[in-house]
Amino acid sequence: MSTDSAMDEKEPKHQRRIRYKGTHPKTFKEKYKELQPEHYADDVTKIIQKGRTPAGMHLPICVKEILEFLQITPGQTGLDATLGYGGHTLEMLKCLDSKGRLYAIDVDCLELPRTKERLERMGYGPEILEIKQLNFSQIDQIASESGPLNFVLADLGVSSMQIDNPDRGFSFKVEGPLDLRLNPKMGQSAANRLKTISYYELQGMLIENADEPQAAVIARAIISNIKKGNDISTTTQLQKIIKDALKHVPHMRDEEIKKSCQRCFQALRIDVNHEFEVLDEFLEKLPNVLAAGGRVAILSFHSGEDRRVKKSFKRFFNEGIYREIAPDPIRPSPEECHANSRAHSAKLRWAIKA
């Protein structure tokens, strides 16, 4: 083999960037600069300064408030129970200053390796950071290896990069498969879930998981379409059914219809991922994994999550297991909400073990 041939085999072929119509990219895949922040840092910074979240990224919420409460010091052992994009993880690692150990878990088999690689490039490898693909209901498995934890953080719900990627099917705003699974390799998709659900079960799901005021109307429309043999396998197909049903409700404005679409997708996502059951199990196991004086902070994004966190913290406080709990939820500052619109609904609660 010639030297030139060997060189050709070693050098990767240059890939042209995705072309798009107009002056600005519109779809998720066209936003190549946002999807490669390590190569286009200035462009990504400009997007964040405009109050937007770059495609494929997730901006951590209430970082200052979380770190002020957790009081992380070098040498401690802690857990980020929801690794996601790794924003909170990175800030907690900085507090440890290369001394101690941080465990980080996530159920998402697609995003986890990307985040692990990103943090490794920053110098946070297995000597300080242990990353595992686990559901946070399995925190007892971490504690059996780590011993009692000094601090735990859980950022509930979905991350921006999951919502923005149409292939994941989390958003009603763009065409994609009606999936909604945090781990697409486990369980059934939302599309398959709808094929077997009854009217009363669907109505109850919309009320319990999302406090949807038009639950009966929406459930009736979805079940009617299923019985007629109409396919509901994409995000936009479900969105159209919801919008068409609500157009006939008196005094329903476009903004209210949009919020109902959002709540319905939330309710389905919670159902297919068993999010409330998983959260309840996590909250029940928490006291057993914390060291004496150990601190836990939990970010929630809707009333169903917050009610469960508040109830659990209060019960364990009354039983003397937690010595102190947040009297009221902490909300993101107006400045943070302006910089990151996805912070608006966040509530932070905390507890300290006796």
Image (tube, rainbow, N blue to C red):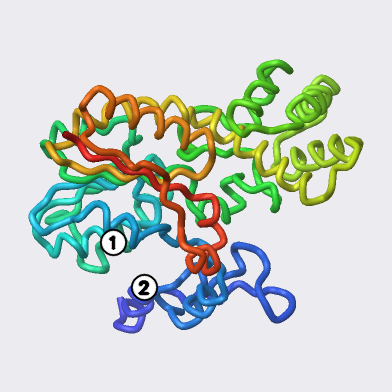
Give x and y (percent) for residue 344. 54, 55
Taking 317 as reference, is 340 left or right?
A: right
Query: Within 10 Å of the Cα at label 1, are there few (<14), some (14-19), or many (20+) other Cα atoms?
Result: some
Rendered image quadrant of residue 119: bottom left
Taking 153 as reference, is 264 left or right?
A: right
Give x and y (percent) for residue 55. 54, 64
Q: How many marks?
A: 2
Q: CA distance from mark 1 to mark 2?
A: 37 Å
Which label was assigned to residue 90?
A: 1
Task: Indicate which label's residue lies in the foreground, 1 or 2.
Answer: 1
Position of residue 20 relative to residue 145, above or below, is below
The type of residue carrying mark 2 is: Glu
The residue pinned by badge 2 equals 9
Q: Secondary structure at mark 1?
A: helix
The residue under the point 19% across, 47% down is: 78
Q: Quadrant of the C terminus?
A: top left
Rendered image quadrant of residue 325: top left
